Structures are given as structure tokens and as C-alpha cells.
Image: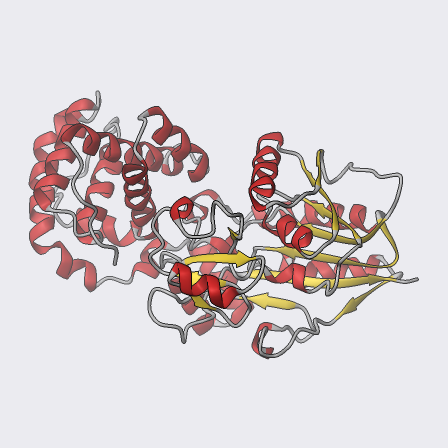
């Protein structure tokens, strides 16, 4: 449970809550990605870094615990609400997250929520209701919340059913529980992880990444300005390691943004061509490489149609996917994804991997990865690819057992990490993004 932030001046406090509520409305009602809408909401209100961080915490806490928070709120609302209530639901949800999860002082959370109602054209008539409900919530809500099953109340039934079929009911529940916990900050360093872990106040994970529970602003951490490291989930750092030594090799990084894997490849001495269809994301990738003192050839283009006069020694395809392995970092996925997204994205992935195969030199290696927990986007995708391409074979991952435990390897030798991994670490440091990766070698 996160600690409360120091109070802001009244005007800043209201703007902070408004940014959180605006982002919640955009995700839950308009079904827009959280990162995009939150960036606009916080920029429009010109939030200071501290207030921006608190607004994000309010919104993401509400998304991770929406089912349980709504269940508690309903116990204090006697009659069904009418239609056209403005942003009332999101105002109540954000206030409940502050009161029950973030230990925000009740007078601040309640009075600002009432102010938000007064400012909402369709919500102003509910200001007295909001005041009464939140006062009761602050008094008896914590006990009610503790008795509820947030996994069952917040997770889509279709997704839990999928995971139960793929991993078994017990593991599926562990995955879901871990996915609803705010993650720690993971960092990939160029060198000397032990030294940087000590300077930052972090721990070195068995995979080589370093992890810190309470990081504060990333830009203020030691080594950021020096370009010594970059933010990257520990699981996301594993696919590049499947290549082995890439120094001097030509490596194509398809769907490269945000660029953590590009940075890894460049830091290992590869000659990297990074392709992404988003010019904005690729520009930010370039800025990050410049901060790190690394270089890559960046190309704005569609991975489905990218061509090259010369073929590549190695190719990394981090394919678009449902991203169900990253719910702990992106809780909006719970509300944005639908069952039909899985086959639609699997079809796109098949086209992408087939195209990538044609860009690889004979004898070269293609690493395919996704941050999805769905077998159709991982194990089954590779089985289907190999059935179509007799000139490729699967190479079981060969990393040291100390780096990747056997439990992270599938029966076919691919990599499969789960959000429930690293459960033996201290609280605040547990968990891992769910990733799949496979190494495919082309015949000489």
C-alpha cells in the first residue's frame, strides 16, 4: 500500500485530482490507452513533477482495484444513479482509491472530490451525495475492502478463464494477483550492476537487472545524466540475451520502440537498425540512445513492409500483442482488451514473423518475443511458423540456470516468464512482466 503524498496547495491539489479523473474517464468510458490520455491530462494542467506522479498513482491504483472499490462504494449508495451523471463514477473511484489505498487525509480527498463535482456540468447535482458517501467510506470502508476478492471483482472473466486453461487455475490466480500489484523499478545497466545497485539503493536480480522499490523521479537517480543505464523490466531484458555474442553483427530490431532492447544490442556492440512505424516514439528512442552515448540506425517504417538491400545476421521481432503480461505496469489493459483481440493480433504476428524470416541471412538467428501470456501469441505462434518454414529450426535457450531458472523454460525450450515469478523476493520487489521468447535459426 502506497504512502500518502505531502499536500499540495489547494489549486494544485484540485488539478492533480482532475488529471487523474480525466485519465480514468478516458480509459473506462472512451477506451483510450492510459499513457496517452494521462500525458495530455497532466500537460494540459501543467502539473509539477510531484503532482504528476501523485495523479498517476491515484489513477493506476483505481484501475488496479476498480472492482473492489466499486463494490465498497455501492454499499453506501442506496438508490441506482440516473443516466447522464458526468464524471461522477470516476470522481468517486479516484477518491475511494485515495481514502482506502493511499492514506490521503480524508478532509483533503473528500473536499476536493466535492469541488470536482461542483465543476462538472452533469455531476454538480451529486455534490452532497459524494460528500456523504465518502465520509462514510472513510470511516468503515477499510474493513469492507479487506473482506473482498479484488481479483474476482476486477479481472475480466474471459482473461482468467484463458489463463486457467493455459496455466491451471491455481497459477492463473497467482498471475492475476501479481498483476494487480504496483511494480518496482527495473533498470538495465551498461556495466557493473553491483556498483550501481549500491549507489541507487537497489538489489541485483539473478537475471542481471537491478531493481528498486522506492525510486522517486527516475531523472534524479545516480547515473541517469551519465547515461549509465536505462529503465527496462527485467523480463523485457531477457530476449536480447538469447542471441549470445552480437558484437560486430548486423541486427535488425523490428517494432523497436520504446528502445530498451535497441539499447541493449547497441551496448553489446551490434550494428543495429531499429525500425518502428511511430515517428514520435522513434524520436524518443533516439533521444534516449543519445543520453546513453549509444548509436543505431533508426528507420520510420512498417515492420510488415520494411525492406533492405542486404540481409541481417540477426533479427529481433518484439511483436505487437495483447500485452497481457504487463498488466501490472499497464492496468488499463484490463479494460481495453477484448477476447477477439487475441486471434486478430496472432494473425498480424504470423505476417510479421514470416516477413522477418525473409530478411535474415542463412545461418542467422531470429528471436521472436511478445509481452503476452496468451499461447496463441507465443508457443502456438512458433509451432505454426515452423510448420510453414522448413528452413528454420527452434533453438532451445541455453542461458545459465542461475540466470534463467528451468521453470521459466517451456518444454520446447522457449522462454516464458510470468508476473508471479520472483515471488520469493521481499515485498515491494516481487513480480516480473510476462514475456515469451523463442530463438529460431535459419538453415545455412
Q: Position of residue 271 (x, y in %)?
A: 76, 48
135 horizontally vs 214: left or right: left
**What residue lies at 24% left-to-right and 43% top-to-bottom?**
93
Residue closer to the observer: 213 or 219: 219
Residue closer to the observer: 42 or 436: 42
Residue closer to the observer: 344 or 356: 356
Question: In the rendered image, which quarter contains the N terminus?
Answer: bottom left
**Residue 55's image quarter?**
top left
Q: How many marks?
A: 0
243 horizontally vs 80: left or right: right
**What residue lies at 73% left-to-right and 65% top-to-bottom?**
244
Up-down relation of residue 162 to residue 262 (above or below) = below
Q: Position of residue 294 (x, y in %)?
A: 64, 46
Residue closer to the observer: 44 or 302: 44
**What residue lies at 38% left-to-right and 66% top-to-bottom?**
429
279 horizontally vs 121: left or right: right
Task: Give the colour scheme of this rendering.
Answer: secondary structure
Q: Position of residue 129 (x, y in %)?
A: 10, 35
Which residue sits furthest top? Answer: 121
Amino acid at each position: 500500500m502506497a504512502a500518502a503524498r505531502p499536500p499540495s496547495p489547494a489549486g494544485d491539489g484540485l488539478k492533480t485530482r482532475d488529471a487523474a479523473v480525466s485519465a480514468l474517464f478516458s480509459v473506462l468510458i472512451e477506451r483510450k490507452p492510459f499513457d496517452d490520455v494521462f500525458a495530455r491530462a497532466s500537460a494540459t494542467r501543467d502539473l509539477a513533477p510531484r503532482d504528476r506522479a501523485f495523479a498517476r498513482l491515484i489513477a493506476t491504483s483505481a484501475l488496479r482495484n476498480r472492482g473492489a472499490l466499486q463494490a465498497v462504494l455501492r454499499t453506501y449508495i442506496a438508490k441506482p444513479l440516473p443516466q447522464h451523471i458526468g464524471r461522477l463514477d470516476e470522481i468517486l473511484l479516484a477518491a475511494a482509491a485515495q481514502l482506502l489505498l493511499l492514506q490521503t487525509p480524508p478532509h483533503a480527498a473528500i473536499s476536493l472530490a466535492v469541488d470536482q463535482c461542483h465543476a462538472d456540468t452533469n455531476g454538480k447535482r451529486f455534490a452532497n451525495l459524494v460528500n456523504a458517501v465518502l465520509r462514510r467510506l472513510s470511516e468503515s470502508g477499510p474493513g469492507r475492502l479487506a473482506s473482498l476478492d479484488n481479483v474476482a471483482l476486477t479481472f475480466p472473466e474471459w482473461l482468467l478463464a484463458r489463463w486457467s486453461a493455459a496455466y491451471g487455475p491455481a497459477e492463473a490466480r497467482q498471475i492475476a494477483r501479481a498483476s494487480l500489484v504496483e511494480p518496482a523499478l527495473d533498470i538495465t545497466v551498461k556495466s557493473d550492476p553491483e556498483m550501481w545497485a549500491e549507489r541507487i539503493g537497489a538489489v541485483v536480480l539473478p537475471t542481471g537487472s537491478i531493481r528498486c522499490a522506492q525510486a522517486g523521479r527516475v531523472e534524479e537517480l545516480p547515473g541517469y545524466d551519465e547515461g549509465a543505464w536505462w529503465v527496462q523490466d527485467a523480463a523485457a531484458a531477457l530476449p536480447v540475451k538469447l542471441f549470445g555474442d552480437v558484437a560486430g553483427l548486423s541486427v535488425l530490431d523490428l517494432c523497436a520502440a520504446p528502445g530498451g532492447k535497441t539499447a541493449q544490442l547497441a551496448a553489446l556492440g551490434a550494428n543495429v537498425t531499429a525500425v518502428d512505424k511511430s515517428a514520435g516514439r522513434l524520436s524518443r528512442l533516439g533521444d534516449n540512445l543519445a543520453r546513453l552515448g549509444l548509436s543505431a540506425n533508426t528507420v520510420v517504417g512498417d515492420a510488415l513492409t520494411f525492406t533492405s538491400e542486404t540481409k541481417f545476421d540477426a533479427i529481433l521481432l518484439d511483436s505487437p500483442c495483447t500485452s497481457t503480461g504487463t498488466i501490472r505496469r499497464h492496468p488499463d489493459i484490463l479494460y481495453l482488451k477484448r477476447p477477439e483481440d487475441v486471434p486478430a493480433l496472432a494473425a498480424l504476428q504470423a505476417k510479421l514473423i514470416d516477413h522477418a524470416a525473409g530478411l535474415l541471412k542463412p545461418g542467422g538467428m531470429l528471436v521472436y518475443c511478445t509481452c503476452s501470456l496468451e499461447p496463441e501469441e507465443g508457443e502456438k505462434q512458433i509451432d505454426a511458423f515452423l510448420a510453414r518454414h522448413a528452413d528454420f529450426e527452434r533453438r532451445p535457450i541455453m542461458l545459465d540456470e542461475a540466470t534463467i531458472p528451468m521453470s521459466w523454460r517451456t518444454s520446447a525450450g522457449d522462454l516464458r516468464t510470468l508476473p508471479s515469478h520472483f515471488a520469493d523476493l521481499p515485498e515491494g520487489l516481487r513480480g516480473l512482466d510476462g514475456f515469451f521468447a523463442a530463438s529460431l535459426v535459419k538453415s545455412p
